[in-house]
Image (cartoon, grey):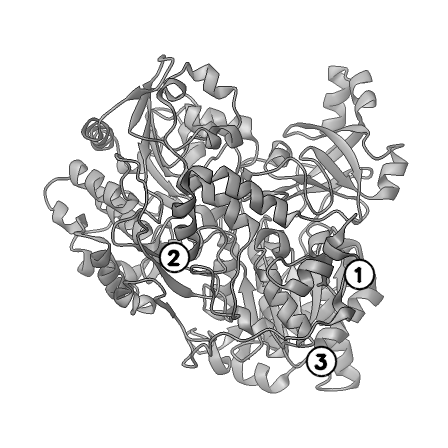
Amino acid sequence: MGTTKHTGRTKLPGKPNPKLWVSKVPFGLGKIKPKHIRDTMKVVWDNRDNLPYAYRILTQGVCDGCALGVAGLYDQTLTGPHLCTTRLNVLRLNTMPAIEPGTLHADIDELRRLDSAQLRKLGRIPYPLVRRNGERAFRRASWDEALDRIAGKIRGVDPKQLAFYLTARGITNESYYAAAKAVRYIGTNNIDNASRICHSPSKTALKRSLGIGASSCNYKDWIGSDVIVFWGSVAANNQPVSTKYMYAAKRAGTKIVVVNPYREPAMEGYWIPSIPESALFGTKLADDFYQVNIGGDIALMNGIMKTWFEMEATSPGSAIDHTFVREHAVGYEELKGHIELQSWDAIERSSGLTRGRIGDFARLLASSGSGVFVWSMGLTQHRFGTDNISQVANLALLRGFLGRERCGVMPIRGHSGVQGSGEMGADPFSLPGGEFAGRDIERIERLWGFELPKWQGDIVGVSLENALLPDDHERKLKLFYTSGGNFLETMPEPDFVRRCLENVDVRVHQDIVLNTSTLADARDEVWVLPAMTRYEQPGGGTSTSTERMVYFSPEIRGPRMPEARAEWAIYGELAARVKPEGSEAVAFRDAASIRAEIARAAPNYDGIQHLSKQGDVFQWGGAWLCEGGVCPTEDGKGRLLPIELPELRKPEGRFYATTRRGKQFNSMVYGETDPFNGADRYDVLMNRQDAAALELWDGDAVVAYNRCGVFHGRARVADIVRGNIELYWPEGNVLMPRSVYEPHAGIPEYNAAVIVEKAETYHALKDTRFVEKRIEELELEVPG
């Protein structure tokens, strides 16, 4: 941990720089780009029935979108206001009226005709609901009926047959903590959170390589760093305010490099609405793109290190910071020996890049005195995601890009609440302030005043699959309780997931709106509980940003769902009904008392107890984790780890497929057309030469298929590496393999080998034996 404090906001340059302009044509007229002004006007129109409340949320609350940490209209990086369309799109979730009773209690098939976007627009969940097996509609219920019934079911099953899940949908640290405590009090360790399907490998890898579980640096460190590398991250699309930081970095002379199979238009140039110069003429962001094969990042990083070791052989000190490595890392000789055994042929084949291009990248990093490595799901959502991130740590350690200004490693978060989830203990492998192991268990038992179950809990994907176990199995999932989330749209093989959800006895959806998974059947009953948003939570709440800033978001005056309750309060009351004796251990008087206990349970969060009003914020760990190169490991040093090349089996003529995001916030889709490339949700992005080889033209109907499923779409020629295709998420999940989890962090695999054919060819030859034969030719292994 560090002692240096964040130095506060910095100003943007006052004079424009035409060299960075995308176009001299004002507002990018004629180009494919987001229509920020139009989208903002649409948001104003959508919130016209509640504009004063919407305005107060924007100007007083902490953003419930991505994890950049904008409080009101301001952050800790730059002066001036910040606002993005992602936050504006999410705004309506907080200002909607209740769902009309006639719609809410309609025949279930009427509701099932709607997709999740249409269900969201119906409005907020106004009161508890129940639908028993065989019933055609939801019935209104009281809170007492709901909690008594759920608690009764919990008491009647083995704790290993329960599972709880919390998404990052505006959920506060207080709710994560209260849930983690209540669930352990009930007696189960099956509790998980949204990081399992996004950044769990980041925490796992950073822990084993550097001893930390979060970003080591700040957004401010981007500004003036010699180089920023975005690995598998389209921050301009998923965290739009970050484009202001990129703009500031570019103005300070920073080079921006993007590693991605697709030359992402959002990272090439962006019109930043809150910077007049950029809003008019756009800003060139990326200086270079390294278009790597899907799953080829480990090979690329091996190639970078191999180049460095070759440089060192002729000119010692030209590529590696030997002083830093000697003082702050172990495993150098083992890593060097491992890399020297790697052949350039294997590196080029796996990465999809030539030795020359890899050398260019290696020399750029070697000549940089400072650097920040930023990554997202392009590195994590693989069956070898943890190894991907440890490779990033290897590069940072070899160059000494750690623990000092304008340097660091940053897993950029896409949800405003997810960084705090594991840190609060809402994770099968974590407890507040520590791991689910040894001394941390003893420490938390002393604080909480009750014994914790000692068996290892399951990750959420395994919990769901346990619903299909025999009824008498000790881990047969019988009750599934989820705060937010929609596994039909976030997990691979949705049809399989539906079978799992519908094979649970009781399912509880604690949420603010309906989604498609809420409407799935259950063996006995489905309960729907109305939750408050973070802006309604009495006593306010806190959230932790990517850069470890803990922000206080106050309760904001406005309309309320009369029967909605704070999520932390629901968990406490449920636990008390399950085990009334001793329930004072899980009863919190108010949100402030939760923060006071968090400060005792999680030492890094000492300070959260003082957050009580708008604008309150502190950063745990100081400006830089591993400050001065000292890691919070047993010996204070980072681990250089030899990482093996993953085996990417792709038969001749097949494609690697992965997913990307369009106009959406995580799985919530807000537009059918991608504003950065004009593609539709069912377009298949593919290389022009690949399309020509299949005699495909732009817009032709295609079918992509494998053992998992069939995807019907249209070919969309794009600047993507040959042999790779991209589909939109979650629509492309039908091709992703179920039950394939990263062994260290448990993240599902979101990549697959697929056949792509003209639709007319597929349908003309859709003889069952033919299709089965073609699918059998696919390797069972999926690419990364």
Q: Which of 41 and 673 is in front in this view?
A: 41
Taking the image as drawn, is residue 603 in sight? yes
Q: In this view, does 362 lie above or below 3?
A: above
Going by the numbered disc 3, the residue's amino acid type is Ala
Is 586 left, or right, of 672 in this rendering?
left
Going by the numbered disc 2, the residue's amino acid type is Gln
The part of the image, by quadrant, that contains residue 714 is: top right
Question: Judging from the image, what secondary structure is the residue with disc 2 in?
Answer: helix
Is 136 left, or right, of 624 in this rendering?
left
Mark sitting earlier along the chain (3/2): 2
Going by the numbered disc 1, the residue's amino acid type is Lys
Could you say which disc has been placed on residue 232 in the image? none
Residue 697 is situated, as x and y percent measured from the top left of the image, at 86, 33
Give the labeled residue for mark 1: 24
Q: Residue furthest left?
A: 581
Could you say which disc has been placed on residue 60 in the image? 2
